[in-house]
Image: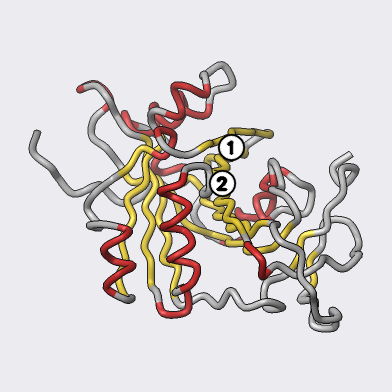
Amino acid sequence: GKKAPSARGASELLAVELFRARSPVEAVGSRRSAPSHTLQQRTASPLASVFVVSLVIPAGSGVLPLAPLSSGHFSDLSETVPGPFPVGGVLQLVLYFGVLAAAASGPAHQLLRAFTAPDTSDAWRNGRFKIIPGVEAGPWIVRKAVGNKSTPAILGKQLKQTFSSSPGVFEVAVDCNSSPAAGRIVSMVKSQARHLAVDLAFLIEPQSASELAERVLGCVRISHVSLANGLIPAYCGTEGEDE
């Protein structure tokens, strides 16, 4: 059918976290110290809920050993004794979108409510969560690997996703290394991160006429980020933090 521009996004990007960890931090947006609990203080627009996208990226051989820290806090590790560094670990980029109360109506919002409902199956969600990537600035080889910015992708068809929720917060965690093809692209993007400006738009895909029109849920530009060792804080939460 005929394409049409999306209405204004249904949310505001109100907080971003980037940290290193030995393994993926599950339900990171629901922990007691998460920004999700204070998002309303960051905007004058009333919020209906919080939607969290957690992108889990392999850190590779450059990840630093984590220093012992108090629960749920981060450190710049500026005083960490240099390597040898252990192989493995992850980088986790966490995006906190405040879903606007003013956008809490219409087919797109009903689709979001269905997506976040506790009785919705993960299989249904995996077939709906969509990304539209675009490289706005960067080397040609990365632009070619990522593809045309107008080409969307259903993430759950290629990548492992997990879903979690707490009152007022819903989170999608995406394992960006769970397919060989995606892993190669992620590795290339990481190596060129300081030279890149990448746009990511997230949507819940309508798959029937009654679910139209499609509307962007949230978007972010990641611009010229340094992934150098020692510059990214380390996560040292404990299982008991939220008890």
Q: Nearer the viewer, residue 92 or 72?
A: 92
Say if mark 1 contacts mark 2, CB within 8 Å.
yes
The residue singled out by tag 1 in the image is 170
Where residue 52 is drawn, which disc sits there? 2
Q: Residue at x 30, y 51 (%)?
A: 8
Q: Check disc 2 and give the amino acid type.
A: Val
**Residue 38, image quadrant:** bottom right
Residue 105 picture quarter: top left
The picture places residue 175, in percent across and down from the top left corner, at: 55, 45
What's the distance in space between the residues labelled 1 and 2, CA to CA? Answer: 6 Å
Confirm whether residue 102 shows in the render.
Answer: yes
Residue 230 position within the rendered picture, expressed as x and y whole percent measured from the top left: 72, 78
Q: Which mark is residue 35?
A: none
**Mark 1 residue crowding within 10 angstroms, few (<14) / some (14–19) / many (20+):** many
Residue under the point 55% across and 40% down: 172
Quadrant of the image for the N terminus? Answer: top left
